[in-house]
Amino acid sequence: MYKEIGIFYDQYIDGTKLNDQSFLGHFDVFHWENLKNDLSACARLQRKPFYKIALLNGTATYYSNNEQLPISGYSIVFTEPMTRSGFITDDKNFSGTYCVCSESFLKGAAKLNLRNWPVFKEREVYVRSLSKEEYNYLSRLMLEIEQEKDSDYPFKEHLVRSRVFDIIHYIQKSINSNDLVPMHTEDTLGERFFNVLENAFFNISPEKTLAGKTPAYFADLLHTTVDYLNNSLKKATGKTTQQIIHERIVEEANVLLRHSNYSVKEIAWCLNFQETSHFLNFYKKLTNTTPLAYRTT
């Protein structure tokens, strides 16, 4: 993941190099004006290799799969590494402060399942509008985080992480309590499976294809047996391991069909189908349509 973060800095951040702060994982703060002038990269629907909190002022639109999320005025946006999103703005007065960090930094020594947290759930973009008072309060927290990041305080990592969670909790406290679940337990086998499954699809391409797509492949990554994994998932979701993997392949295929210029043959290769005909049969069986039909509708 550190390599992907380095690539992000090379592509997006103007005048800022990835540096080692001796934190447990990656952490940084940057501003809208640090982003390079070519905003076409921001508009592309893609994943970023970190958790992101964006405190924004202005008019813009986020894209997530087939959803458009317009923002205006003061707002805060949360994404996680599996969130596939794009962003456009023509607001010349737009401003933003971005706090980005790896999962290892955000977890620290705690056994947290971050993808159960409301602001990071479901691989979606979480957006919340802010009042001026809320924006000013969060701006002060962001400034404190940025100053502490660059300070000489020997325990700054713990302080920075604490302030980041202050922001998360500040927003989550406004969420309906019925949507909140306990988040202090270690990941179950099912949760670890879904994390591994999502990581397998991270920024796949013809040059970086899906490494494996069988229950045995994922059971091996999780150091468990196929039967035990299957029973755990069946109990938790009502679906077999194979069904879940197949549904995820179709989901990724649909994204690539709609949001990339790859040919059907290239998409089949991305998804570890050695023959395009096998991919076509697989897709038709699960969707009752063809990849080209989906792409053109």
Image (cartoon, grey):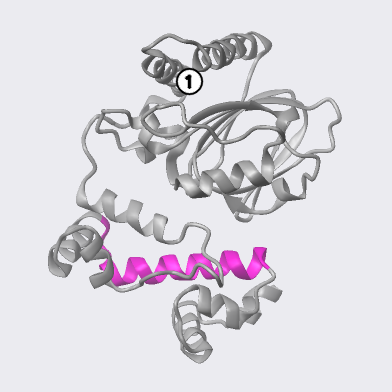
Q: Residue at x 61, y 48 (%)?
A: 85
Q: Is residue 157 visible?
A: yes
Residue 265 % position (x, y): 59, 83
Count of numbered marks: 1
| Residue at position x 28%, y 49% in the image | 191
Q: Amino acid at mark 1?
A: Ser
Vertical arrangement, residue 215 with respect to residue 63, above or below: below
**Residue 150: x %, y % from top left:** 53, 16
Q: Main secondary structure of the magenta part?
A: helix
- In magenta stretch: residue 76: no
Of helix, strand and loop, which one carries label 1? loop
Chain part drawn in magenta? 237-260
Q: Splitting the image into 4 quarters, where does residue 29 fall?
A: top right
Residue 256 magenta: yes
- Reading the image, the residue beneath label 1 is 174
**x 45%, y 61%: residue:** 201
Could you tell me residue 255's position as x and y percent? 58, 64
| 240 to 203, vertically: above or below | below
Relative side of 105 to 87, left or right: left
* 196 relative to 128, above or below: below
Q: Quadrant of the C terminus?
A: bottom right
Viewer-proximal residue among 227 and 96: 96
Residue 74 as seen in the image, left or right of residue 24: right
**Residue in the picture at 46% in, 88% down:** 278
